Image: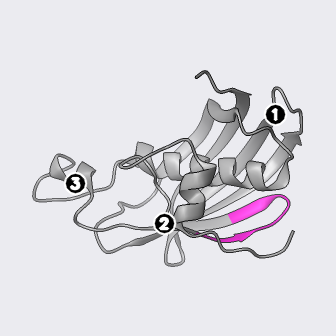
Amino acid sequence: MGERVIDIEGILKRLPHAFPFVMLDRVLEIGEKNIVAYKNVTYNEWFFQGHFPGHPVMPGVLIVEGLAQSGAIMLFENMDLPEDIVMYFMTIDKVKFRKPVTPGDKLVYKVEAVHQVEDPIRPRAKFNGKAYVGEKVVAEAIMTAIGAKREV
């Protein structure tokens, strides 16, 4: 598949999420079984109002959500899936948070597919994901996702 950049408009077309829950700003590259994306973390983020006042730290669950959103985009780019399929978390395992993410950080998501089942009705995948700030791993997780028809 090679390298492809996807900007925020492309991300919004590919994910069912909307502001303020989109945890990606740009996709830098997509391969058959990997993706690299990032989020610029700014002080203006909605979650810093309460997490934590005077000591802003990005909630770990939102970092993991960014990994999951990256994996979902990779699946849609590499599998021939119907437009009415939405990817959902099934499991999140071995989550580790290694360093706080704070305003000014560029959070880079690197996700690799370990297993994929290309099924037009119930696509499934297992991913290894790591989030970085600079060269340091700040979070990691093993995730599985399953696709289901979007209920309208």
Q: Amino acid at mark 2?
A: Asp
Q: Residue at x 62, y 36 (%)?
A: 93
| Residue 127 in the image: above or below residue 139 | above
> Which SS class for mark 3?
helix
Q: Residue at x 43, y 43 (%)?
A: 61
> Which SS class for mark 1?
loop
Image quarter where the C terminus lies is top right
**First reached walking from the N terminus: tag 3 or tag 2:** 2
State the mark number for residue 25. Answer: 2
- Left or right: residue 72 compared with residue 16: right
Region in magenta: 27-35
Find the distance from the CA under tag 1 to the CA under tag 2: 25 Å
Image quadrant where residue 34 sits = bottom right
**First reached walking from the N terminus: tag 3 or tag 1:** 3
- Left or right: residue 54 compared with residue 70: left
Residue 138 at what x, y percent from top left?
Answer: 48, 61
Find the distance from the CA under tag 3 to the CA under tag 1: 35 Å
Q: Amino acid at mark 1?
A: Pro
Q: Residue at x 10, y 59 (%)?
A: 54
> Which SS class for mark 2?
loop
Find the distance from the CA under tag 3 to the CA under tag 2: 18 Å
* Magenta residues, dominant SS class: strand
State the mark number for residue 48. Answer: 3
Q: Nearer the viewer, mark 3 or mark 2?
A: 2
Residue 86 at what x, y percent from top left?
Answer: 66, 34
State the mark number for residue 123. Answer: 1
